[in-house]
Structure formats: structure tokens, C-alpha cells
Image (cartoon, rainbow, N blue to C red):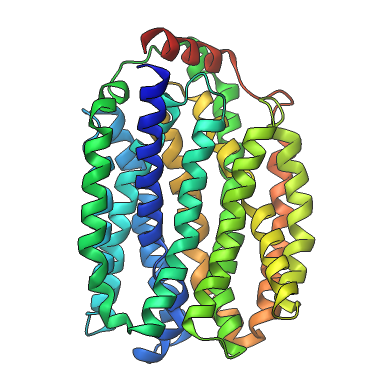
Amino acid sequence: MTKSERMRALAFLCLGHFLMDTVATFNMPLLPLYEGRFQLAPLATGAIMVCSMLTASFTQPLWGTLSDRMAKGRLVVIGPMITCIAVGLVGLVPSYGSLLLVVAVSGLGVAAFHPEATALAGRVSAGEGAVGLSLFVVSGHLGLAGGPALSGWLAETHGIEKSWWLVAPGLLLMSVVALGLRPSFRLLNAPVKQTTAAVATPMNRTVWLLLIHATVRAFAGICFTVGLPFLFKADGMGEGAIGRYTGIFMFAGGVAGFSSSYLLRRGQERPWLIWTSAASLPACLLLPVLPRGGPMILGLIVAGATLNATVPMALGYAQRQLPGREGFASSLMLGVSWGLGGALAPPVVRLFQDRLGEAPTLQLVALCLVATAVPALLLPRAGGSEAAAAVEAHYNREN
């Protein structure tokens, strides 16, 4: 593929990722609304997001492994369509049980999309460093920010019962993405030669350390994403304002992730992970007690940025350790880490908020970030690997 063809494919992938993550986070600011509508206990409210996290995260290795072994391209299109339809039904469900069902189905669509789409983004970005993959990741963060803003606006101005309005536009836009990506699927299906270094023990150890780091960060990030709407609700905010504030938190992480991957060179992963671990702790400790308005917005930006600034870099680092298995590497960093962190985060944060209060609970969660420094300190001092150089050279030769 020529460079222009690669960039065209990357643009469509970014659009698909934006749409995917927009609908994936649609329910985040609506948890207080669901709690009141179905008269739920805090643990039952947390279970809504647990259900989503379990299907969206723990099934990703299955989808990633399947993607690595079969003709690729279908899941990039089918996943978002499934999620779009399921999310469109959340306002029509008559009971708590049916809400859990549609949330679980939407998570399956999220899980199907991410490993294959991330692998393709990595391949079309070969030779461009981490910039292309960072654009892909930041487009998802834009969607993560847009989802809460969209659902908050819809619920406040038209009622959540109008969620079905999303289905037709979502399916139309994903059809455009599918047509735009079709010529690039041959790149995704191109064979990659495995090297001896690709399966060496030190790289497996590196991936596990990255996974531990990502899991703890995911736990803290999800706790804040779930807990902040209840903090804002207690202050009397409506769904629209809650969605906007939550969106700022998510958006800041995406911008920070892209900026760090653009500015930092390979080999700087370890000090960057250590630095952000140190910076995120005070930022997240202060955030819940900041005055609303300007100070809170600034706090959301700083906390969101320091929590998520490492995502694209860590993802690219993990993919370089497993050349030829990018789908599986992606499922670990974007799937399993969020699944392990997200399985506990929603019920824990709601249970503690009910007993300790909204702000103290989030400050308690912030203390968990101390644990992110340990795996970062144990990483090799030089990022990248011989396998990484080999696979990038292979991509450049073949495409």
C-alpha cells in the first residue's frame, strides 16, 4: 500500500473507532437515571457497568485470537453495528433484567471490534512510529468523551426513550466506514513472519508488566468514570451537565495519549509510565473536592490526562512484543485490562459511595494508583525489541 492509501485507511479506522466508543460509553452518565427509574440498590447499579465490562473486555482475547486465525475485516464492521442496535434499545427496555441483556450484547460488539481494528491500525501505521496508532486511540477517546455528552443531552432534552434515534445514523456511518476500509483488508490478512525473539521469555514478561500497570489504571479510571456522575448528581447537576463534565475527563485522556506518543520516542516508555504514575495520584486526590466551575474543569483535564496519557504508548509497546499477534496483544491491553479493572470498579465505587460519600470514595480509589509505579519500575530500561524492528521492516517490505 502507498502512504496515501495507508493514511486513507487510518482515517476510516479512526472514524469507526470514534463511532464505536461513542456508543460504548453512552450509558456512563445515565447510571443515576437508571438507579431512580428501576429503584436499584447501589450494587445493582454497579452491576450494569460490570455486565458491560465483562462482555466488552473478557471476550476480547477470544475475538483477538479468532481474528489472528481467520480472514479479517468482518469484525471491524459487524462489531459496531451490533453495539449501535443494542444501545438504541436501552431507552425502550421495560425492566432491569432486559437492560442488563442489551448492555451485555452491546459489550460483545465492542469486544469484536477492538482487537481487529487495533491490529489493522498498527499495520497501516508501520514505519510511522506511534503516531498513527495514537491517532487511532485518540479517536476512540473522542468517542469516549462524546458518548456521555450525547446521552446526557438526549436524556435531558428528549428523554432516554428516544435512544432508538441513534440506530439509523449509526448504521449508515458504519456502512461508510466499511466501504472505505474494504481495500485495506488485504493488509490485515497479510502474513507476518514470526521470529525467535517474538516468543522469547523477556518479552512475555514485559507484556505482563504492561498488563498489570494497565489494569490498575483501568480500575481507577473506571471508578472515576462511574463515580463522578453521582458526585455531580449530588451537587444538583442535570444529565446534560453530567455528560459534559464526564466527557471532559475522557477527552483529556485522549489528547494526552496522542501528545505523549507523538512527542516521546521509543525507549522512553518506562520513565513516562513512572512519571504519570506519580502525577496522577495528587491530581485524582484533589479532583473530588475541587469547587465546581473552572477549578473542577481544570481538575478533570489534569486527572483525565495523567490517568490515560500512557494508553497509546503502552498499546504500541505491547504490540511490538508480539509481532504477528497484534490482535491478541490489543485484546490484552484494551480488553483484559479493562475487564479486570472494570469487573470490580462499578459495584465497589457505588457501594463505598453509598456508605462513605461520593468524594471520600473517589479519594480512596486514587490511593490505588500507588500500585501502578511497581510494574513500571520493573520494565526493561530500553523499550522496543529486535522483534519489533523485524516486524516493522517486514510490513514495509510487503506493503
Numbered disc total: 0
- Reply above or below: 278 against 188: below
Image coords of residue 127 (percent x, y): 51, 18
Q: Is residue 228 left or right of residue 295?
A: left
Q: Is residue 221 left or right of residue 63?
A: right
Q: Residue shown at 70%/27% (left/top)?
A: 380
The reply to whether residue 197 is in sight is yes
- Reply above or below: 344 against 178: below
- Tell me where residue 36 sits by quadrant: bottom left
Image coords of residue 200 (percent x, y): 53, 18
Residue at the extreme top of the image, as rendered: 397
In-front residue for pair 182/26: 182
Q: Residue shown at 47%/75% (left/top)?
A: 29
Picture quarter with the N terminus: top left
Q: Is residue 196 left or right of residue 98?
A: right
Q: Residue shown at 66%/25% (left/top)?
A: 266
Image coords of residue 331 (percent x, y): 42, 41
The reply to whether residue 78 is in sight is no
- Tell me where residue 104 sits by quadrant: bottom left
Picture quarter with the C terminus: top left
Image coords of residue 79 (percent x, y): 26, 49
Q: Residue shown at 48%/10% (left/top)?
A: 393
- Reply above or below: 313 against 87: above
- Reply above or below: 98 against 303: below
